[in-house]
Amino acid sequence: MSRALPRLAALLLTVGSVAHVAATPAAAQELVGSATALALVASDTPSTLLPLFPTAIRTAASAEAASTIAPDFSRIRRPRLLPALYAVTVLTQVLDAHSTMSALGRGGREMNPVMQGVASNGTTLLAVKVGTAVGTVFVAEKLWRRNRVAAVALMVAVNVATAGIAAHNYSVASRLQ
């Protein structure tokens, strides 16, 4: 039972994250809908509205103004889903480190050539995994300012992939025993 618990936790976290996204279509529509309703005002021509997603037909002046102004989503409140995805990222990275150490302790070997030198030391492996989680959250935060939907999609994809890797590692560890 105790060996199945980490796999079950990884599966539930992954399914829970994806189910939460699917169960809240209003939040997803809010993410997409508010981005399409925004308009930017050029500073030199206050009466001219520039659309957030400019059309192909523009004058030279409006094209220059549109290329220098980028949408800023930093003042828009984040959905509750994003910090939850950050927490799940840290958790799945820790589960990946634990599952890797579990498989290595039972005679398995690290197949990722980038991680082979790090995997033999548990503390170093955990440090690299936490660093990976922090780096992923940092990239998502930077991405959030420009493309909110892509930030959420990135976090969901990373969490699903890492949970799948952790589940595979636990599977290998259980077969080696």
Image (tube, rainbow, N blue to C red):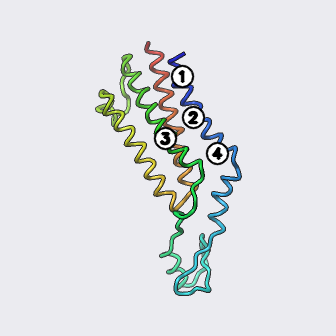
- Cα distance between the residues tagged 2 and 1: 12 Å
- Cα distance between the residues tagged 2 and 3: 10 Å
Bin the neighbour count of mark 3 within 10 Å (Cα to Cα): few under 14, some 14-19, many 20 and up: many
Bin the neighbour count of mark 4 within 10 Å (Cα to Cα): few under 14, some 14-19, many 20 and up: some
Q: Which residue is mark 2?
A: 13
Numbered label attached to residue 21:
4
- Cα distance between the residues tagged 3 and 4: 15 Å
Q: Type of residue at label 2?
A: Leu
Asked which secondary structure carries label 1, the reply is helix
Q: Type of residue at label 1?
A: Leu
Q: Position of residue 9 (x, y in %)?
A: 55, 28
- Cα distance between the residues tagged 2 and 4: 12 Å
Q: Which residue is mark 1?
A: 5
Quarter occupied by the C terminus: top left
Q: Type of residue at label 3?
A: Thr
Q: Which residue is mark 3?
A: 89
Q: Position of residue 35 (x, y in %)?
A: 62, 64
Q: Residue at x 62, y 37 (%)?
A: 16
Asked which secondary structure carries label 3, the reply is helix
Marks 1 and 4, the one that precedes in the sequence: 1
- Cα distance between the residues tagged 1 and 4: 24 Å
